[in-house]
Amino acid sequence: MGEFTIKMPDVGEGVAEAELVEWHVKPGDPVREDMVLAAVMTDKATVEIPSPVTGTVLWLGAEIGDTVAVKAPLVRIEVAGEGGELTATAMPETVTIETVEEQAPVTKVESPPPPESKKAVKAAPVARVEVQTPAEKPIASPAVRLRAQESGIDLRQVAGTGPAGRITHDDLDQFLTRGTPSIMPAGLAKKTAVEEIKVTGLRRRISEKMVLSTSRIPHITYVEEIDVTDLEDLRATMNGSRKPNQTKLTILPFLMRALVKTVAEQPGVNATFDDDAGIITRHGAVHIGIATQTPAGLTVPVVRHAEARGIWDCAAELIRLAEAARTGSALREELSGSTITITSLGAMGGIATTPIINHPEVAIVGVNKIMTRPVWDGSQFIPRKIMNLSSSFDHRVVDGWDAATFVQRIKTLLETPALIFIES
Amino acid sequence: MPMKEIVCKLLVIGAGPGGYICAIRAGQLGVDTVIVEAVKAGGTCLNIGCIPSKALIHAAEEFERVIHMAGARSPLGISVEAPKLDLAQTVVWKDGIVGRLNSGVLGLLRKAKVKIVHGKATFRDGKTVEVETETGTQVIRAETVVIATGSEPVELPSLPFGGPVISSTEALSLKAVPKKLIVVGGGYIGLELGTAFAKLGAQVTVVEATPQILPQYDAELVRPVAKRLGELGIHVLTGVKAKGLSDEGLALLIETANGEEQRLPADKILVTVGRKPRTEGWGLEELDLDRAGRFLRIDERCRTSMRGVHAIGDITGEPMLAHRAMTQGEMVAEIVAGKKRVWDKRCIPAVCFTDPEIVTAGFSPDEARAQGFEIRVGLFPFTANGRAMTMLSEDGFVRVVARADTNLVLGVQAVGAGVSELSSAFALAIEMGARLEDIAATIHAHPTRSEGFQEAALKALGHALHI
């Protein structure tokens, strides 16, 4: 029998450490070659660590949320036969492997600590449910186990309310009637359970980023009403000629093009502010970050060089990136480097928002919901499509006047959309 | 004239504890069942194992008790004059019990409407066997076959059975007590029988190759047994290899741990170095079933690698115990009858009928730690138990092993006179998922040894009452 130590791979770009965000295995689990053992997260990208060998997991080197240094031991795997035989071919480029023969003198140093104690979830005073880890046999009397077998129920799925998490006949009844684990009797009852969720991975990044932005940047938020009736007519016309499988326009590509036009006149808004160094960097390129909701949380994929993209190109790139972000397949470069950001909650957009600037940028434009409202045209009320823009600026480097000028210019472009397409 | 083929739903090969239970349960469930037995219903357990050995052990205990009273002033105030033993009569009595149980098993099989075929079965293919009966070859075809052929004693190449070299089977039918008996193998079978013969008057020497007798138990459990072996005048030689018979066949040649060769005079040499699954002689080669070491590989439903062929009992692996086989047999019968069943037992209790007895159920402290549990252990000695005092046997203890965090009972062990009867309480506690508190809060009748179980649980909880 041999033993492999798999170390935290070098995940590239000079990253010295990565956060462990997910374990796919636990000690005692059999693993096949190429099975994913863990996921680690660097600044923005999540990297999966595959197993280079087939064997049994002996030891895990970190808990979820731990920051692990590159080259630090991550997993130890026991393999059948001579450990050395498997190294060369099975080793992916990024994973460092050490072979330790069981009998070798180094074993003492490298050998794993005793198997991690099966610490049962202690009965917290607030919650009586003790969820059992699947590896352990569920605690239940033989009669309960027999009933479960006959009903085709895996008792590991049933929450036990008895002492030490024992599954009672009542627990099984509950499971059979509701199909889900439940400990509460029918009707109204007090719920005293609490759930603690460790803030890890993307959520931790979001949290840190938000604190950075709000603690450092004095925000000024400016909300303006835009009449998008004409824009919506134009958009409908443009989309009307598209085939079903072709990209359709939303309002965002128009806004992106309007932004490109506006920042050409007001380069101070398309900038990043290194407040430690005291340097504002104005960017020629317009890399527009698009705040996107994904299952894991908020991410900001970036449409690069919007100034060099036509409206259809902007639309296509937007769809591609949003999809990549949602499925987690976005590349590291696609998730960083924006110079200005758009945030849109779409149909959920509300009347107004107070967007938080994507540090170290200095401006963010928030799109609110389009609503048809009665507008007085001087002689009568007419229905118009009205949308608010809620934009925030870093007040240290963007004055209120400049902010207002910027938004008014966008308003003009969006209300008379032909202007967006006129070469200056 | 060939006999008419029998076609049935279930065919059980071997009527030992696993096989006959399987057949009875299948019959109860209305499954058309045939059972084949080459020797006698009841298998090793009933004919040459558990039952006759316990009969002999009991007779030996009774005899030793009266000898003890005759030899010295009994603290009980009983005196006996020159007790005598007629081992031939003892064996007749023992055979009577075996005979009663034999016919009892056959009766139960008939009551369950199981067809019994006597003879040796050989596989023709996975669904068909041929049985050599007294009246000719009987072919049986079945939808499902259960292999329950059991195990047999392992023979040492240097000490083949025959002459003075005997297995446990012959030892249970000796007509006279050998003067000098050497037991090769200090496992539970060797020590049970060695102790019995010592009590019956033999000079017994136990030769064990490993450094400890009863190597499957921890030292704490073995200590009272080792002490008692010494009191009974049994010589225990550990780390010693049996090399073979001397030329004239009157002594055993051994090699001690430091390489010395010695000669141990012997009238009988009982070889008990383990049992092996009976995988030969019935056409297993025809089936080419997957193996797990020496045993047949089975899954959690006792299915072998061939569809429609199950295996139960000793042929499927350790522990080779009758009650494991019985439980497997019952489960397989219910599966054949269409019920959903899977092996989900939490423990298989085991008893060693030495003097004193050893019982284990679930994990020992070391095993529990090896599984990664943080544990607490409570041990209650019988020296503090009233009932033990009144029975003149205070050796031994009850020991409970529980998870440190939830107090869930993981294992219970005991050593002491009569503790085999506590095995049910231990196993029940584990199967029910009892915590230490459950055992501590159950009233245990006074005065009994079972109080030791309750006290051990209290001890583990930190508030034993009688120590």
Image (cartoon, coloured by chain):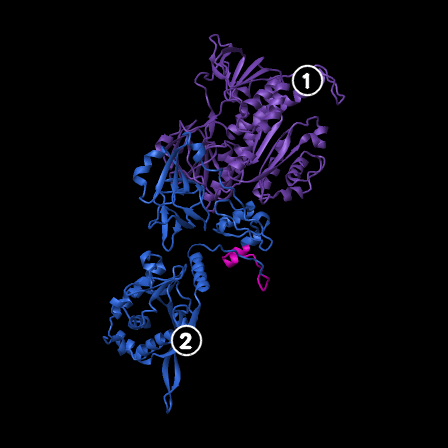
Chain colours: A blue, B purple
Three-letter amino acid code at disc 1? Answer: Ile
Q: Is residue B234 above or below residue A342?
A: above
Q: Position of residue A245 (x, y in %)?
A: 26, 67
In front of the other: B170 or B353: B353
Relative to residue B315, is residue B67 drawn left or right? right
Three-letter amino acid code at disc 2? Answer: Val
In front of the other: B282 or A266: A266
Q: Position of residue B290 (x, y in %)?
A: 38, 35
SS at badge 1: helix
Q: Which residue is mark 2?
A: A223
Residue A176 in magenta? yes
Q: Which residue is mark 1?
A: B67
In front of the other: A387 or A402: A402
Marks 1 and 2: which is nearer the front? Answer: 2
Chain where mark 2 sits: A
Asked if both marks, 1 and 2, belong to the same chain, the answer given is no
- Residue stretch in magenta: A173-190
Relative to residue A59, is residue A165 drawn left or right? right
Chain where mark 1 sits: B
Magenta residues, dominant SS class: loop
Relative to residue A145, is residue A99 drawn left or right? left
